[in-house]
Image (tube, helix red, strand yellow):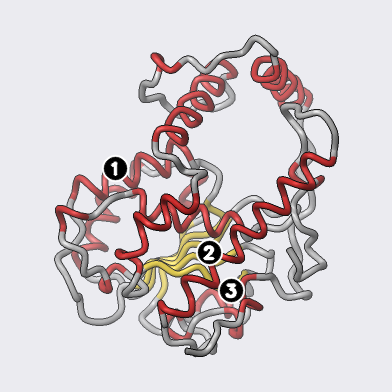
Amino acid sequence: MTSFSTSLFSPPPSNSPPAPVDLTIVQQEHLRALEVHFGDVSYELPIKEHSREKTTKGDLHATITRLENCLIWRRTEQIDDVDHLAETCEEESKTGKNIVLGFSNKGQPILYFFPNRNTTPIDQRRAVHAVFMLERASDLLCDGVTNVVVIFNFAGKREGPPTSVSVARQTLHILSHYYPEKLGLCVFQNMPWIVRTFVNLMWPFVDPNTKRKVKFGSAEGGEIIRDGAVNADQLLKDGGGTLDIPYDHATYWPALMETCKKLRSNEEERWRALGEPRVGREERSFKRCTDSNSA
């Protein structure tokens, strides 16, 4: 068995992460209020207040509620226990239906979803599998980069039953409530008519900010290359690029898990080296550098 090259788990030197965003005075005040709230030595997570929340839209109280709900959900689902979730999700990953590989020109990790490769029986499918791969894409982030590129590619013959409405609804709820700013760019490629119809029906209800992040591509999938979002050598051939790497679970999965766990461990060491733990510390101070392919 040959090893998988982990070079595609690090952004190329040519990537250009976006410049830091200057916060408004109000945003700075809200950030300070969040630091005070969650940094209080007597703070306890309100476990009994786990309820669904609406988009905060700058509402400080709603933001606190959402963050607390997110923390509760992450602990309940053991999101930060990589080994546990890897064991839970690996079987569903063996067909290569979800892949993290390559980077955009802004240094964003690319996460692929190939729905037609899903062979898992409907009653065994879980939304947490998509979340697990999104978390692994997040592990690959460098300093200054906070979101990812997501590509939904519907090419190929469907190998199993379509995703149930309940799983799709649960996945959308998780992504919109617990990962509201994780999406940098979303591309739908080669959509079948039934998916396009569903998207058209839901489109009027999609947040304008989210709409700006969505692109619709052809079966060839070269649009994001021509738009300058991704270089061809960072995009899988299935998605319209020149990266010809057939999915081999036996080599890809161990390489991804080892890389992600190493990055997480090194980031924790750098975070602890900064001094006493505190809320509000910038990720730039402990994430891996954008000009380095190392962890």
Q: CA distance from mark 3 to mark 2?
A: 15 Å
Measured from the top left, where is residue 86 in percent x and y?
42, 57
Q: Is residue 219 left or right of residue 270?
A: left
Residue under the point 53% across and 27% down: 67
Q: Is residue 184 left or right of residue 160?
A: right
Asked whether the beta carbons under mark 1 and mark 2 sit within 8 Å of each other, the answer is no
Q: Is residue 227 visible?
A: yes
Residue under the point 69% across and 13% down: 40
Q: Earlier in the sequence, mark 3 or mark 2?
A: 3
**Secondary-structure class at tag 1:** helix
Nearer to me, 118 or 213: 118
Q: Which mark is residue 102?
A: 3
- Amino acid type for the residue under numbered disc 3: Gly
Q: CA distance from mark 1 to mark 2?
A: 25 Å
Measured from the top left, where is residue 212 in percent x and y?
52, 53
**Pair 3/2: label in front:** 2
Q: Earlier in the sequence, mark 1 or mark 2?
A: 1
Q: Is residue 212 visible?
A: no
Residue under the point 77% across and 42% down: 271
Nearer to me, 153 or 260: 260
Identify the residue under disc 1.
170
**Secondary-structure class at tag 3:** strand
Asked whether the beta carbons under mark 1 and mark 3 sit within 8 Å of each other, the answer is no
Nearer to me, 204 or 183: 183
Residue under the point 45% across and 58% down: 133
Measured from the top left, where is residue 52 in percent x and y?
36, 25
**Secondary-structure class at tag 2:** helix
Identify the residue under disc 2.
257
**Pair 1/2: label in front:** 2
Vertical position of residue 157 compared to residue 115: above or below: below
